[in-house]
């Protein structure tokens, strides 16, 4: 497994270079005048343009600009935003919030989703099954911003049970509702995935064998059935955690969570190359690592899967 | 392998618990005495001469005090740090400053603090955003280029620690009135000797001191008990909180998580919901912000003033204001707003009045209009609804194929303006810098002015503006500007639409928190209700 892991880690390098270059090129190409609108309704002064052009090497060809940026990045210098804030500081304040939110969302997804899936998958058709199917259908049909705005309005403004926004350094409790909103869609998928997978495996040979051996039902379900049924679910959750670590522009906006999603969004809007590329580069690495972790987890869940 | 699973699960649980404990705000007592203010990330470091946008400006106004201060209700300027501003020829000004003013680091505010600050802002290589505010001072042209031939402006001279003189290039009667703008604030020595230190913890001479800042989250100020101004600050602490969506901030104010909001989301304006929600906390006063639609005069299709007037008269301003802005905005009758000194009502006359018949008549006189008429605005600024309505109004009245064609961002809109790339009407938002009618004219309509996006040029207007600049006193200057405004309106290079009032809201916790007509927060008025 060690060599496999190493190989996967090495694959990170070309992917990282490729994505950051593409993103750099795209942000750079957004507009041919990065200073339009920077100084309000007035035109920027020539000296301001000259200074900024020099600071961000805007006079060089885009490939040279990118290489200079990459060189600085390798020495740990994420660069500065146009407003003179270090991008690394921005990431350091925003990323913990995003991670917290992502973990809360995934925890909610996993716990509620798998529980609902197991419940319906084992019981088969009936009231609970229908209830879960219909409620997940509703969650899937609703866009996240609708769920978010409705919950904020009802729980925050009307009932006053939660704060309508989340403070800068939120506690887990304050992130529960935003986490639920963020994870609601995936939660519905997880429930359905678990249910289908369980229903399929219920008739599998190894389950029949386990029952025939006279194993207690708890062990049949808990060890044999569930562990095998969870492989697609873990794949999905792994992908989802990677995506959630990339921030959530809509949910962050609704609850004013100062996370990484809003930061990237603002960076793109203001054409702040340093912010966008720095964060996206980081997110690419996080995403790839999350996927690697999932692949390694397969081997844990299913001993038949071997790497090397 | 099962051990691994348990370990992963256990560490995840530990992480969750650990972060749960790590959170939690400061002491309740402190937060109970802090006023939370809706805010956005500033675009530049907090340097007065390098800040022209609202977010940075709001904090700078609390951190600094200028030579004059605008009254919170009338915007009339009164001397703040200045003891007197005198002149005999409206070109050479002698400014005496009051003794006893200090910066937050204890160093005194002297004439040199002002002169150094203004010179820094004007100096080309410093690339300050507010550079052009110094352009009237003698010697500006030599220092403002990329390769300056002089280190400082010769028009500024320190006489003694409490006095300095300003020589302008040409007489500018209303100069003292403009000095309340943040670009004219003094700078402490620390800024010149330790710039990174200053940027990390800005030092001013105003009613609040810098306490701390978390980028992209919040910034806190505490009361400056050594403040030398006549009106002392009352609030203990101000916390400027960054919001990405104004609606969230609004809900926070309504539900008591935030104390002050600097604008209203359009959903709250509709049906006057904000007045019901906020009650006594809902505030509105006349401001200095106007919306208008400019013509690209470099496009020969718009050369005829009658055509331009016909389009102006085809817009039913009052109906649009009622429908889209809940009747809160004021239909324009000229370029200036009533909060500006020198404002004359109804300057535009019939040309800004909705009159379908007369509009059709003028259009026929001008020979009609060929092809689609495009109206352009940036769709990231909430302009879509009213631009759509204006296009409809023109189409229905004149039978022209008027279409709203948005561009995605403000920067794209500015790029088109700078490249002279508009092919139809384009939206203009203008925020006056100081409460004078002049701020609505010179920058916009003088030949080759900095924001003359229409490429409008009328020698008579230029002459009228110059004459007003040199008028013997402010009353005469105002009359001159009003005359110039009439001249411009008669050419109609830019269709006035409406003025936006200053709108802000306070939570139930707040006793008072006012903006002045320039839509800048007067933080000396901020105070909470006594705790019961």
Image (spheres, coloured by chain):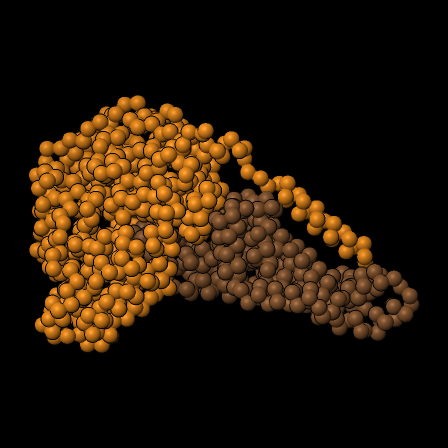
| Percent position of residue A60, x then y | 42, 61
Of B2 and A72, which appears nearest the observer? B2
Q: Position of residue B459 (x, y in %)?
A: 9, 57
Chain letter for the part of the structure drawn in orange: B
Tell me where residue B87 appears, x and y as whole percent.
13, 33
Q: How many marks?
A: 0
Apparent colour of chain A: brown
Tell me the residue at 84%/70% (across/down).
Answer: A207
Residue at x 11% of width, y 67% of height: B358
**Which quadrant: the N terminus of chain B?**
bottom right
Q: Quadrant of the C terminus of chain B?
A: top left
Is residue B487 something that shows in the picture?
yes
Q: Position of residue A250 (x, y in %)?
A: 50, 58
Q: Residue at x 87, y 68 (%)?
A: A211
Q: Is residue B419 visible?
A: no
In the rendered structure, the answer to whether residue B505 lies left or right of residue B94 reads right
Snapshot quadrant of residue B26: top right
Q: Height in image: B472 above or below A14?
A: above
Decide: is B271 above or below B285.
below
Looking at the image, the residue that sits furthest to the front is A127
């Amino acid at each position: 497994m060690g060599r496999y892991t190493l190989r996967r880690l090495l694959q990170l390098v070309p992917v990282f270079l490729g994505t950051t270059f593409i993103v750099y090129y795209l942000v750079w190409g957004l507009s041919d005048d990065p200073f339009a609108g920077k100084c309000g309704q007035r035109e920027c002064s020539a000296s301001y343009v000259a200074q900024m052009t020099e600071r961000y090497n805007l006079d060089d060809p885009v490939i040279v600009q990118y290489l200079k940026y990459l060189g600085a990045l390798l020495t740990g210098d994420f660069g500065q935003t146009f407003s003179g804030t270090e991008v690394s500081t921005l990431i350091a304040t925003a990323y913990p919030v995003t991670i917290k939110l992502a973990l809360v969302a995934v925890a909610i997804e996993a716990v509620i989703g798998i529980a609902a899936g197991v419940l319906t998958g084992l019981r088969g058709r009936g009231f609970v099954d229908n209830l879960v199917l219909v409620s997940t259908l509703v969650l899937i049909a609703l866009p996240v911003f609708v769920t978010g705005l409705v919950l904020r309005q009802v729980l925050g403004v009307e009932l006053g049970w939660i704060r309508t926004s989340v403070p800068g350094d939120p506690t887990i409790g304050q992130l529960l509702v935003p986490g639920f909103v963020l994870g609601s869609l995936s939660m519905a998928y997880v429930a359905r995935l678990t249910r289908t997978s369980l229903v399929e495996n219920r008739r599998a040979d190894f389950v029949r064998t386990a029952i025939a051996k006279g194993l207690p039902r708890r062990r049949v379900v808990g060890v044999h059935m569930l562990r095998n049924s969870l492989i697609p679910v873990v794949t999905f959750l792994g992908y989802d955690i990677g995506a959630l670590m990339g921030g959530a522009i809509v949910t962050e906006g609704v609850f004013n969570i100062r996370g990484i999603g809003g930061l990237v969004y603002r960076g793109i809007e203001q054409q702040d190359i340093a912010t966008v590329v720095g964060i996206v580069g980081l997110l690419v690495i996080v995403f790839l690592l999350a996927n690697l972790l999932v692949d390694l987890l397969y081997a844990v869940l299913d001993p038949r899967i071997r790497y090397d | 392998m099962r051990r691994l699973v348990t370990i992963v699960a256990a560490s995840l649980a530990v992480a969750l618990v650990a972060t749960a404990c790590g959170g939690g705000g400061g002491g309740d007592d402190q937060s109970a005495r802090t006023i939370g203010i809706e805010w956005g990330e500033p675009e530049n470091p907090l340097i007065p001469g390098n800040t022209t946008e609202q977010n940075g400006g709001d904090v700078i106004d609390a951190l600094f005090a200028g030579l004059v201060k605008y009254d919170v209700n009338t915007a009339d300027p009164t001397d703040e740090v200045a003891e007197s501003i005198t002149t005999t020829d409206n070109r050479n000004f002698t400014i005496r400053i009051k003794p006893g003013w200090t910066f937050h680091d204890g160093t005194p505010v002297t004439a040199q603090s002002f002169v150094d600050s203004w010179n820094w802002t004007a100096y080309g290589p410093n690339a300050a955003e507010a550079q052009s505010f110094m352009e009237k001072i003698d010697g500006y042209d030599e220092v403002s280029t990329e390769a300056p031939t002089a280190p400082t402006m010769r028009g500024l001279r320190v006489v003694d620690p409490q006095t300095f003189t300003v020589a302008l290039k040409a007489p500018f009667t209303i100069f003292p009135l403009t000095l309340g703008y943040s670009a004219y604030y003094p700078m402490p020595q620390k800024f010149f000797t330790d710039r990174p230190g200053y940027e990390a913890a800005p030092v001013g001479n105003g009613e609040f001191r810098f306490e701390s800042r978390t980028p992209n989250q919040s910034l806190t100020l505490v009361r400056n008990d050594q403040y030398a101004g006549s009106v002392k600050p009352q609030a203990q602490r101000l916390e400027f909180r960054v919001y990405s969506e104004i609606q969230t901030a609004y809900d926070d104010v309504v539900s008591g998580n935030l104390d002050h909001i600097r604008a209203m989301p359009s959903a709250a304006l509709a049906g006057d919901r904000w007045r019901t929600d906020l009650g006594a906390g809902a505030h509105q006063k006349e401001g200095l912000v106007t919306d208008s639609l400019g013509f690209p005069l470099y496009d020969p299709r718009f050369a005829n003033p009658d055509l331009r007037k016909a389009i102006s008269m085809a817009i039913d301003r009052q109906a649009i204001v009622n429908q889209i802005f809940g009747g809160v905005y004021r239909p324009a009758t000229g370029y200036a707003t009533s909060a500006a000194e020198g404002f004359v009502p109804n300057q535009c006359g019939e040309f800004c009045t909705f009159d379908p018949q007369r509009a059709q008549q003028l259009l026929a006189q001008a020979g009609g209009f060929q092809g689609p008429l495009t109206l352009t605005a940036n769709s990231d600024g909430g302009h879509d609804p009213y631009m759509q309505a204006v296009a409809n109004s023109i189409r229905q009245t004149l039978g022209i194929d008027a279409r709203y064609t948005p561009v995605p961002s403000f920067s794209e809109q500015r790029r088109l303006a700078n490249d002279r790339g508009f092919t139809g009407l384009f939206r203009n938002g203008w925020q006056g810098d100081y409460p004078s009618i002049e701020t609505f004219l010179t920058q916009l309509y003088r030949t080759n002015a900095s924001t003359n996006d229409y490429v409008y040029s009328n020698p008579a207007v230029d002459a009228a503006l110059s004459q007003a600049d040199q008028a013997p006193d402010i009353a005469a200057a105002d009359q001159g500007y009003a005359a110039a405004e009439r001249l411009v309106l008669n050419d109609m290079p830019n269709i006035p639409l409406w003025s936006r009032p200053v709108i802000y809201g306070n939570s139930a916790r707040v006793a008072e928190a006012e903006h002045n007509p320039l839509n800048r927060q007067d933080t000396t008025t901020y105070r909470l209700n006594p705790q019961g």
